[in-house]
Image (cartoon, rainbow, N blue to C red):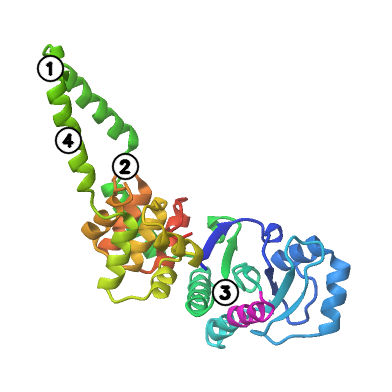
Amino acid sequence: MPLEIIRNDITQMKVDAIVNAANIQLQMGGGVCGAIFRAAGAEELQAACDEIGSLPVGNAVITDAYKLPSKYIIHTPGPIWQGGSRNEAKLLQASYYHSLELAKLHQCESIAFPLISTGIYGFPKEEALQIAVSTISSFLMEHEMLVYLVVFDEASFGVSKKLFTSIHQYIDEHYVDEFETTFSRFRNMELYSAEPIQDVREDVYETEESQQVHSHLVNLVNQLEESFSERLLRLIDEREMTDVETYKRANIDRRLFSKIRNEAGYTPKKKTAIAFAIALRLNINETIHLLSAAGYTLAHSSKFDVIIEFFINQSNYNIHEINEALFLFDQPLLGA
């Protein structure tokens, strides 16, 4: 199952487990921790945490979620940032990993994380995000689970300033405003309509010509190219990839992939089709060819399409990094 980055309040997530960025004493704190305690019922949750006692940084424990819509709360103390020389990166990675393992142990199918340690603990957001995404995506390559990375807004989200600037410049250079595109289209229609229209004789629709048209349409239908599913499966075979490797790299749910494989005429959403192009590491022309089988293309009148084109031209097929950029520009994320 995929990793999704969403803007939400983690206490409102209807998942099997949410993760609390706890302190080592497992006491009600501020920020996300305080919000989780209050929403769950502070007295009940604190009593459960007191029974556990303290917890080393990077470890994880589980309690009931009480009044929350989730079933469990997984508590994990992240590291306090001290300049990066005190093993902070490995400790943060351990917080995510142990939380995921604990969720798997309790047969959770879905889990929601905050960006651990990026609040009052001061962990740099860009590095914290990379650790979170890397750890979660590595886990998902081996296990089936729906994982949410929950942030309140773009300001709380860390992404490379260099990458952000590069994408912004690419959009400025390649994005064609929708108004300009629409105006150009209507202008062309106006010029076209200015041409004299010849009289159309009724005998155009005589039986013989109608039969020719019908025959031509039948031939066209019989010569249809392969469907999206057929083209996708052929590409997977050509690249000697397995089904599991493909849908995991595409950030696609296993059940959706099964539907695509078993329904020859299935038409996916555009973001799903592009996710497979990224998983298969297709170039721009190959991507457009795959999209065409589902009735889509890439256009410079869409910021989403321009961002996808930017990453493909950079030969950057890291779907989670692409989704980070799409999230930052308020665009739909790849996968399902």
| Quadrant in which residue 240 is drawn | bottom left
Q: Secondary structure at mark 1?
A: loop
Q: Residue at x 71, y 76 (%)?
A: 75
Label 1 to label 2: alpha-carbon separation:
28 Å
Report the side of 210 relative to 45 (left or right): left
Whether 206 is drawn above or below 44: the answer is: above
- How far apart, in angstroms, are the residues tagged by discs 1 and 3? 66 Å
Query: Considering the numbered disc 2 on the image, is that residue within a helix, a strand or a loop?
Result: loop
Among the two numbered marks 1 and 3 on one chain, the one whose residue lies closer to the N terminus: 3
Identity, as a three-letter code, of the amino acid under mark 2 = Ser
Reading the image, the residue beneath label 1 is 195
Nearest the viewer among 202 and 117 is 202
Residue 172, percent across and down?
30, 48
Q: Nearer the viewer, mark 1 or mark 2?
A: 1
User: In front: 328, or 288?
Assistant: 288
96 versus 308 height, above or below: below
Residue that numbered label 2 is attached to: 301
Closest to the camera, between mark 4 and mark 2, is: 4
